[in-house]
Image (tube, coloured by chain):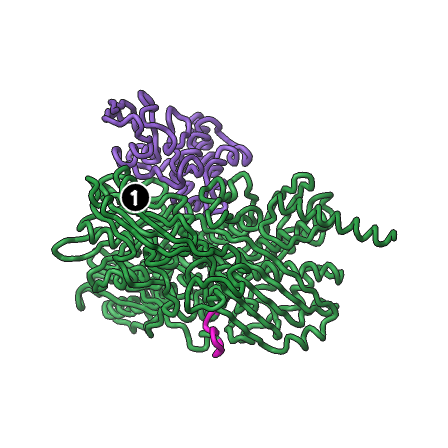
Chain colours: A purple, B green
Amino acid sequence: MTRILRLTLNGRARADAVADNLLLIDYLRDAARLTSVKQGCDGGECGACLVLVDGSPRPACITLAAQCEGAKVETLEGLSGPGGALSPLQRAFHERLGAQCGFCTPGMVVSATALLRKTKRPDEGAIRAALEGNLCRCTGYVKIIDAVQTAAAEMAADQTAEAAG
Amino acid sequence: MNAPARTATRAAGTRTPLVDGIEKVTGRARFTADLAGDAAVARILRSPVAHGVIRRIDTTAAEALPGVLAVVTGADCAHPFGVLPIAMNEYPMARDRVRYRGEPVAAVAAVDAATAARALKAIELQIDPLPAYFTATEARAPDAVLLHDDKPGNVEREVHHVFGDPDAGLAEADLVRTATFTCAEINHAQMEPHAAVAEWVPGREELIFHSVTQVPFYTHKHLARCLEMDPAKIRLVKPFVGGGFGSRTETLNFEIIAGLLARRTGGRVALVLSREETLISHRGRPETEVTLALGMRADGRLTACKAEVVMRGGAYAGYGIVTILYAGALLHGLYDLPNIRYDGYRVYANLPPCGAMRGHGTVDVRHAFETLVDRMAHELDLDPFTVRRANLLEAPLFTPNGLMVNSYGLPDCLDRVEAASGWKERRGKLGPGRGLGMACSHYVSGAAKPVHWTGEPHAVVALRLDFDGAVTALTGAPEIGQGSSTMVAISVADTLGIDVGRVRVVCGDSATVPKDNGAYSSRITFMVGNAAIGAARNLRTELAQAAAAKLEADPADIDCAGEVFSVRGSAQSQLTWAEVVAAALAVDGPITVKGSFTTPEKAQGGGHRGGAVGSTMGFSYAAQVVEATVDVDLGRITVDRVWVALDCGFAINPLAVEGQIEGSVWMGMGQALMEETRYAEGLPLHASLLEYRVPTIADSPPIEVHIVESVDPLGPFGAKEAGEGALSGFPPALAAAVADAIGLDMDALPLSPDRVLEALVAKRRAAQRAKRREDA
Ligand code: FES
Ligand code: FES
C-alpha cells in the first residue's frame, strides 16, 4: 500500500507518495536526497542514521517513514544556521576535530543538537549519556566530547552577551 | 632536515582543522553509497558451506526473472587476485571450490533490492562439503585436507629468523620466563560499510569506478587484470571514505564483482554491503598465539628473546606473508636486544581471510612481550619504567635485522607519561581493585619497499599554479579521515610561505592525480609529505626567479612569508603573492611542477629472506600508562584514564596527531577489553555491531596525549608516523594495570569479564592446590 506522507523536513513542508513499509532512512536518502543520513549497520546499532523527529533523536533505519506523518523531521543538512552558516556544534566539530572520517558525524551532531537544546551546559557525564548510541571508530570520542563542550560554552556565552546587549 | 620553529606565521606545527572538514559537519560529504542515485542494485550470493567443491551453479531461473539485469558467477572471472604478487590465490567469486562460509559464489544486478533478493534465491547452488578447519591446530593436522594444493600442512608461510645468539643470551640471564598468549581475532569495524558504485560507459567501453578503498591504485590494477581491460579505460575515484584501519588496504572481492556487473549491464551498478557482509569481508587481525621466552638480568637488562607465533590466517593469502613477517621483524627496533629468535607460522583455515589491521602484525606480539617484561620486572622487584630504561637504544643505528633507526624519542616518552600519571607517587596507593600499568610500542613510518615494486618513486605530488592564484596540489594519497590532504596542504603552504587556505588539495581520482600506493603502513606523512615539500620547493624556485627579476635581486635572496615576497636583508622592496604569480605566469603560462620521494637504499631492510618487511625510514615510539579498576565479582574492567606520549618526529598538524593518537589508543582498548570475532562451524556469530562490540562513548576514558618531537633527519619537517604506534601499547599496559590492581596475570585477549572470572577461578584453585600440598 502507498499513502501520501506529509511532513516538515528541515523546515519545509513536503508531501510524497510512500509505501507503508518504506523506512525513513530510505525515504530521506532516496526520495529527499538527504544523504547525510548514513547507514552504518543493519538496524538500530550504530546511530549513524539518527535524525530528529519532533526534536527527539530517532534511528531512521528502524523507523517507518509513515510514522512521521505530520512530524517535524530534521537531518544534519537542516541544522546549519541562516545562509548556511555553521551552527556552533558544526563549527566546534570542525575546529576541534570531532570529525575524522566524518561517517558518524551526522548522527553525532544530531544527538548533540538534541542534548544542547534541552541542557545548556551539560557536564561530561551528560554528554556521554546522550551520545551512548552513537558509535565512532576514529576519534576515541575524546575530541567529540571536547567539541560538544566547546559548542555549549560558546552558545552560553552568546546568550549571556545577548541578554546583556 | 630541521624542524621549523613554531611561530604564528608558519603552517607546519600549527593546529589546523581538516581541509575537508566543512563537508563532514554539514552533510555535504559524499561517501560511495551516497553516489548510488538510480543505479541498478547489486547483491552477492555467498557460500552457505565452509569448505566444499562446487558441483553446480545454475543461474537460468534468476536470469529469467523480470527486472534482473545481470548475473555473474566464478565462471566470469578466471583471474585470481591478491595484494601480494607472489600470493594471488583468490577469485572474486569462487570457482570450483569454496573455502569459507560467506565466500561470494555469484552476484546479481537488478532494478531494485527486492528483485535482486529474489534473483539470489532463484540461483541453484550445489556444493559437496569437504572437511573444514576452524583452528590453526586442526588445519595443521597431518591428515588435514589442503585448502590450497601448493601449501603443504596448510601453512601459507613459515619464517625462521635468528639474530645474535639467543641461547647464549638466555644462559646469561638471571631470570628466564616463558609464557603463551592467545589473542582473539578482531575486525576493523570501520563505521562505513563497504560499497562500490561502478559505471560502464557503452560506446567508449570505459569503466568509471567509485569505491571505499584505501588503495585506489591497487584496485585500479586488479580491476584491469580481472576484467581484462586496458587500465587507461578505467577511471578510479575515491570519494569520502568512512575509515579504513586496514580493512580496505587490499582490493576486495566485491569491488571486482561490481565491475563485472557494471560491464554486464552496460550501466551503473551500486553494490552496498550490509554490516554483516562487511564483517564477513573481514581482513582483520588474525587469531594469534604467541609463545615467548625472555631472559633478563637482575638489573632489568634484557638478554635474549625467543618467539614462536602462530596465526590463523583464514582461507586466502591476502597480506598473510607480510603479517607473519612483521610479527618477527618488529621484535626489533624498540629496545636494545641483540639476540632474537623468531619462528612464525601463517596457517590457512576455513574462515574469512585476515589481512592488515592498524599496527599490522605487531600488536599481539608486542602485547606478549610487554606483558612478560612486566611480570619479570615484578618478580625481580624492579619498576617497569626502570626495566624499559635499562634497554634503550641509542640512535642512529641499524638493528640486528637491518632496520634503520635515525631518531628515537622513547626516553622522553617514558619521562612524560611517568610524570603525568603520577606513577611514582600513586602506584600501589590507589586502593583495592585499582591499578596502574605501563607499556611501550613502536611502528613504521611507511614500508620502505612497496608491495608492487615498479622502480618508481614511492610518492609523487604535483602542483599547479594558474591565473586564480590558488595552488592546486594533486596527490593520489587517499584521504580516509586521517587528515592526509590537510598534511599535504600544510606542507605546501609552509614551504611556499602562503596561507593553508590558498592550497586546494585534489586527491583520489585517477583521471587527475599522480599514482600513489595508498593509505597503509603509515606511509603518507613521511613519503607524500616529503614529495609535497619537494614540489613546493620547485614552485618556490620559479616564483623566486620571477620575484627576483622584478626586484632586481638574486633569486637565492628572495623570501616569501605571509604571502609577501621580499629580498632578504632589505626592508624596502616587497611584492604581493598576486604580483609575483602574475610575473611568473607571464614567463611561460600556467605552472606545473612536481616533487617525489624515494626511500634510500639503506632504509630498505636486511638482506635476509623477508628482510624488506618492517623496513622503514623511521619508527614512531610510544609509552603509555593506563589506570584501571577491576570489579572482581563481575570480572568487569573499567579503564579510568590513559596517559600516552608518542614520538612522531615533528607534529606537522598537532590537532590531527592528537586525534590519531587518541583513536589508536582507543582502538587498542577495544581489542584489550572486548573485541573478538566468534564462529560456530565457520558461521560468524559476531556479524553485527551488537555482537561485535566496540567501545561506546560511555566505555571510553579520558586520554591525555603528550607529543614528543625527536625530529627525524629524513622526515618531512622531521615528522614520522602518528596513527599506529600507540595502539599496541594499550593491551599490555591494561594487562599490567590489572596485574597491579588484583595480582592477576592474564594470558588471553580480550580481558573480557568471562575471561577475567575464569582466570580468577583458576588462580583460586591453584592457590588451594598449593595450600593442600603444603598442608600434606
Ligand atoms: S544505521 Fe541506523 S542505527 Fe545504524
Ligand atoms: S569520525 Fe570516523 S567514525 Fe567517527
Q: Residue visible at 26% across and 52% down?
A: B72
Instruction: Identify the main secondary structure in magenta.
Output: loop
Binning the other alpha carbons within 10 Å of mark 1 as few (below 14), some (14 to 19) or many (20 upward) gives many
> Eyeballing the image, is B72 above or below B274?
below
Q: Nearer the viewer, residue B256 or B522?
A: B256
Residue pointed to by mark 1: B120
Residue B243 in percent (x, y) is at 40, 50
Q: Is mark 1 within 8 Å of ligand 1?
A: no
On the rendered structure, is B443 left or right of B757? left
On the rendered structure, is B498 left or right of B406? left
Q: Nearer the viewer, residue B265 or B163?
A: B265
State the extent of the magenta-drawn residues as a range. Answer: B606-614
Residue flagged by tag 1: what amino acid is it? Leu
Instruction: Farthest residue to the left: give it.
Output: B203
| Quadrant of image for the N terminus of chain A | top left
> Eyeballing the image, is B90 above or below A2?
below
Q: Residue visible at 62% across and 74% down?
A: B339
Q: Nearer the viewer, residue B692 or A15?
A: B692
Q: Nearer the viewer, residue B107 or B239?
A: B107
Quadrant of res B149: bottom left
> Eyeballing the image, is B663 above or below A28?
below
Quadrant of res B592: bottom left
> Could you tell me which secondary element the residue under label 1 belongs to?
helix
Is residue B497 visible to the viewer in this orientation of the structure? no
Ligand 2 in which quarter: top left
Residue B422 in percent (x, y) is at 67, 51
Residue A154 in percent (x, y) is at 45, 35
Residue A100 in percent (x, y) is at 41, 48
